[in-house]
Image: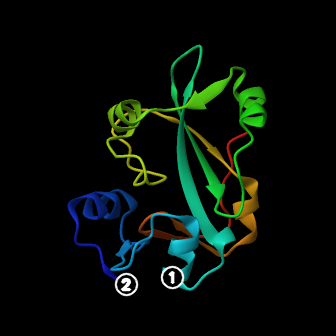
Amino acid sequence: MKPAAHRTSLRVQSLLGPRFEVLEFDASTRSAAEAAAAIGCTVGQIAKSLVFRATVSERPVIVITSGANRVDESTVAVHLGETIERADADFVRASTGFAIGGVPPIGHSGPVVIVIDEDLRRFDAIWAQPEHRIQCSVLPLMN
């Protein structure tokens, strides 16, 4: 691991401020398993940011979930009051400013709805794929 140097990582570091440290990896961290292996943590500590499109309002919805979990789209739909569908690459980039596979949990270029998996609360530290570590004592949830 090394301190942030890539422009995207530096942008996220700037948004997070000095209380957090954004790190980059030389090894691939495309999957939760690869990220956990590179970091030396459990797959559950990897926070995956998955982008969906709300089917009625067309709002971008980012679900931040534990790397050990799969998103139950029907549960998210109940929470939002509308169904969601996987977003395509153009929608992800236009909505967040990032490409699929590199969407961090913060620092998006536009407003997004964020839903956070409460399983992440059980960890003192989580790692937001692909390259951002977030140290927290309690992860706030949106209800």
Q: Amino acid at mark 1?
A: Ile
The numbered mark at residue 1 is: 2
SS state under label 2: loop
Q: How many marks?
A: 2
Visible in this render: residue 137?
Answer: no
How busy is the neighbourhood of tag 2: few (under 14 within 10 Å), some, or many (20 plus)? few
Q: Which of the 4 image quadrants contains residue 143?
A: top right
Image height of 27 relative to 74, above or below: below
Q: Is residue 56 above or below residue 62?
A: above
Circle 1: element type: helix
Task: Please report the residue visible at 41 percent of the width from the left and 68 percent of the height from the top.
Answer: 131
Name the image quarter holding residue 78: top right
Please state the horizontal and vertical placement of residue 66, each as a whole percent of the image. 67, 60
Q: Which mark is residue 39?
A: 1
Whether residue 142 can be seen here: yes
The residue positioned 35% from the left and 32% from the top of the image is 90
Amino acid type for the residue under numbered disc 2: Met
Q: Position of residue 29 (x, y in %)?
A: 45, 70
Q: Quadrant of residue 20?
A: bottom left
Mark 1 or mark 2, earlier in chain: 2
Q: Residues within 10 Å of mark 1 (few under 14, many from 20)?
A: some
For marks 1 and 2, give the CA distance.
8 Å
| Left or right of 67 on screen, residue 58 | left
Location of the N terminus by quadrant is: bottom left
Pointer 1 with pointer 2, Cβ within 8 A: yes
Residue 128 is left or right of residue 6, and the answer is: right
Q: Could you tell me which residue is drawn at 43 percent across and 53 percent down?
A: 101
Closer to the camera in the image, 15 or 64: 64
> Where is residue 26 shown, x and y percent of the image?
33, 80
Residue 58 placement (x, y as % from top left): 51, 19
Label disc, if present, on residue 30 of the rendered structure: none
The reply, left or right, for residue 69 in relation to residue 107 is right
